[in-house]
Image (spheres, helix red, strand yellow):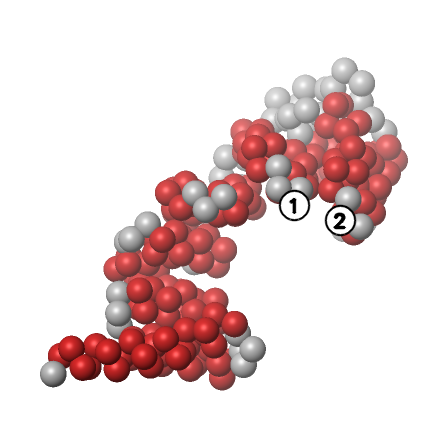
Amino acid sequence: MRNILPYCLPFLLLPCSFAAPSQPLQHEQIKQAYYDSYACERKHDYAGALRALSPVLTAYPSGYTVNYRCGWLSYCDSSFTDALACYRKAQLIYPSSLEIINSITIVFAAQRDWPSVEKEALKAVKIDYYNTIANYWYARSLMFNGKYRLSEEVSRKMLAVLPTSVTFLVTLGETLFTVKKFDEARELFLSCIILDPENKTANRYLPLCTGGSKRTKKRSK
């Protein structure tokens, strides 16, 4: 990787047209800007990390890698509008980039914009049917959008290939709990506790499942 980095990085920085920037940077300048950015990020100084990359963004305003990273740093800084703008610029270069589509999905999720999460996650699922991140957000957005049956189907699909995935066991459990299938949800949360004893969601739902199941049985008598 070290040997090819000098060659692949400029390719990712440049737009698809391969048009040269007006003031191109040397490899060492690009590398130093990224390294300074990483150092600021480790300190949670996201504004500083963005400032460190400003020379690269100025030289390569349409570059994929720099916009992808600036999108991430803006997201970390809760600057969601800026994050989306950077991700969209990067997406113009690689429209089918799963890392970009999933990142856009996560930005919308942070804003609890569930219709947009559903839309973006579905794009990624159509590209990669079993993509874990995309299917997780697709299932959760469907649940929050009231599409419980489809949310259940997505979680079950993923559990068929990842049977011990606590992520999808919890998501399916929450969906079933929402539609008052308390006994099934309880079994899923019990499985979660075996795999992940400290799982907060499973531990929170378990007593609620028991209580809900009892109330349901009383009404059915």
Q: Quadrant of residue 191?
A: bottom left
Compared to residue 121, the image places residue 93 above or below, namely above
Q: Image point 68% across, 24% down: which residue? A: 61
Q: Quadrant of residue 207?
A: bottom left
| Total marks placed | 2
Q: Image point 33% across, 81% down: which residue? A: 210
Q: Position of residue 128 (x, y in %)?
A: 44, 51
**Residue 161 is at least partly visible in this image:** no
Which residue is more in the foreground, 147 or 210? 210
Q: Image point 11% across, 83% down: which residue? A: 221
Q: Image point 81% across, 35% down: which residue? A: 52
Compared to residue 42, the image places residue 49 above or below, namely above
Compared to residue 85, the image places residue 69 above or below, namely below
Q: CA distance from mark 2 to mark 1?
A: 9 Å
Query: Mark 2 touching mark 1, by CB under 8 A?
Result: yes
Compared to residue 167, the image places residue 28 above or below, namely above
Residue type for callout 1: Cys
Element under disc 1: helix
Q: Position of residue 87 (x, y in %)?
A: 57, 35
Which residue is more in the foreground, 14 or 190? 190
Badge number at residue 44? 2
Badge number at residue 76? 1
Question: In the shown orientation, is residue 73 left or right of residue 51?
Answer: left
Element under disc 2: loop
Q: Position of residue 122 (x, y in %)?
A: 39, 46
